[in-house]
Image (tube, coloured by chain):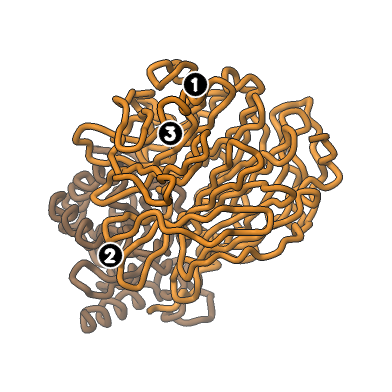
Chain colours: A orange, B brown
Amino acid sequence: MRPHHGSLGLLCALLACKGADPAPSAAGAPSSPTERGEIKEAPATDDALPTTPVSIPADAGLAPSIALPHDPKAPAWFSWLERRPDGTVALTAAALREDGLDPPQTVVEGPHLLANWADVPRVAPTPGGALVAAYLVRPYEIRTSFQRPDGTWSEPIAPHRGTAEEFGFPALFAPPAGAAEAASGPAMGIAWIQDGTVRATTVRPGAADPPVVLDPRTCECCRVAAVATPGAAVVAYRDRSPAEVRDIAVVRLAGRDPTHATEPSVPAPRGWTIAGCPVNGPQAARAGATVALTRFDGKDGGRVDVLFSTDGGAHFEPPVVVQASGSLGRAAITPLRGTTFAVVYLSKDAAAPGRAQVLARTVHPEKGVGPVRRVGTTTAGRDSGFPVAAAVGQRFFVFWTDVDEGGTPRLVGRSARIEDVLGAAGKEPA
Amino acid sequence: MKTPRVALLIGALLATSTAPGCEGKNKGPAAAAEAAFPPIFGKTLGGEYLHVADLGAKAVLVNVWATWCGPCRKELPTLERVYRAYRDRGLVVLGVSVDGARDRDAVARMVERAGLSYPVILDPSAKVTTVLDVSGYPASFLFDAHGRLVWRRDGIIFEQDSDLDSQLAALLATGPASAAQP
């Protein structure tokens, strides 16, 4: 292999050519601005978040995902893909508790599973506690399967119909009619991208309702986010206007199934135009009726926002800016305590070209953002994938992917005390 | 590929050593050429090693793409037409596929379907995305003969793209088609 001579200088030159802002490091990073004048920002710090490693039972893993339980006493679920030496791929999941991961279980494995850095499988509990998995198979389709009480998995089905060229980016959510689950068996809402549209349906073991088109024109290569809210669900995705504006849009499912969906809307438009695949889609979380959406765009050299709704996704407030420029995005968000959330994102590391910092901040619909906290570092390339985060008990977990010297992706997990994440700014009562 | 590569490299180095703006580095022509072009390299579908600095072209349009990217697929025939329109004046288009290693056959099918005659290299670990600060696909980068980045496009290049055309017209206006020629 040819050595990477002069990559430092080149990268600087390229950044200058693009007009990107220099990447702020967490150390001494300026306090990010906010578009909401009433929000007071916490001062920036160069604090590394005190964390401990999380043992992950995988030699080579990628595509991490976390799903929170509906019952706060139940564990969260962490899932990932493993590339096996024989060329097969396995979707693996483990319960995530305050003291770490339970022994993993294999959901599905084989040569047909599709593993990539951006289009990740999901394993999530239904409101009744059953597990459902949504994953990708070649040539590029989605399959869903439910775990039976005996631990085996139901025959996988395709939630989509038709002969589209590609289906992908599944997101699972408890369907608004979740209360009916006990009578009719486990059910889960699923949204996905299908040839530049976003669609949704409700899946059950061995069956899927007819899909509904939520938006007929969307980014075809950006992940979808979905979250259940009281009596409804919110699906967020990257829009695609005829002029190639790719802002984050939302649809609210307010009825018993996806046929009861609002028209798509774009909260606080940014007007980021790119006739391409930015990949960097939104992530969603909720605490009570408060919904938080992450949003990345490249308009100012890489910006991350959080959009809040305090009425279950019916309306969204102006954004809270998490990083104004120099961000790689790929943001994750999770409720921390009360309506304080933690947002985790990647930022270009000015001191180490080719590397990125994994950063975390608290974010609150009224208090704004907390200090920038460094969680770790990873490759700035796409192999770092999308970090995920969750608060479980009194611990805050962050998982991401890094690449070893041989180019093999490796999962990294760190956990911290929630009190340390909240810091002095996070004294909100639970 | 080794013999042509050496010849091309020597030519590129000679061109670089006399290029305006490249003097005064006190590193000699070899170091200048190494430092000028970004480290964009990989194996072609035919298994040959290719580095962007070895192309010896008057201008190089690097196109970062993937088979899973719809806009990328749409753009490929346009790039082929750009290549055919300007290659005699010294343009080389270099496709860099960031598809995974298992998707090599899909890349080959796409190249064949789009009728690409320009070189395509495989970058399964997508190093190019870090080197060129790529945040979306496709992304295209126009370099002059000395490896200087003169233009970039985040997103697709359109048919009769006036922005690219004006850049190419300026870059290819004078001199021989090959930077390797004296």
Select label 1 or label 2 by which is in front: 1
On residue B121, which mark appears? 2
Please report the residue visible at 57 percent of the width from the left and 50 percent of the height from the top: A388
**How far is the residue under mark 3 from the one under mark 2?**
47 Å
Where residue A303 appears, as percent x and y from the top left, is: 59, 41
Q: On the image, numbered disc 1 is attached to which residue?
A: A252
Dot 3, how many residues are within 10 Å of its Cα: few (below 14), some (14-19), or many (20+)? many
Select label 3 or label 1 by which is in front: 3
Q: Earlier in the sequence, mark 3 or mark 1?
A: 3
Out of A147 and A373, give the one closest to the viewer.
Answer: A147
Work out whether A86 lies above or below A278.
below
**How far is the residue under mark 3 from the one under mark 1?**
22 Å
Where residue A63 appears, as percent x and y from the top left, is: 46, 55
Does residue A91 appear in the picture of this structure? yes
Left or right: where A184 falls relative to B178: right
Q: Chain of mark 3?
A: A
Q: Chain of mark 2?
A: B
Where residue A241 appears, as percent x and y from the top left, is: 39, 26
Left or right: where A263 falls relative to A154: right
Q: Amino acid at mark 3?
A: Pro
Q: Chain of mark 1?
A: A
Left or right: where B95 falls relative to B29: left
Out of A99 and A113, give the one closest to the viewer.
Answer: A99
Q: Amino acid at mark 1?
A: Arg
Please report the residue visible at 62 percent of the width from the left and 32 percent of the height from the top: A286
SS for tag 1?
Answer: strand
Q: On the image, numbered disc 3 is attached to which residue?
A: A186
Q: Amino acid at mark 2?
A: Ile
Tags 3 and 2 in contact by the CB under 8 Å rule? no
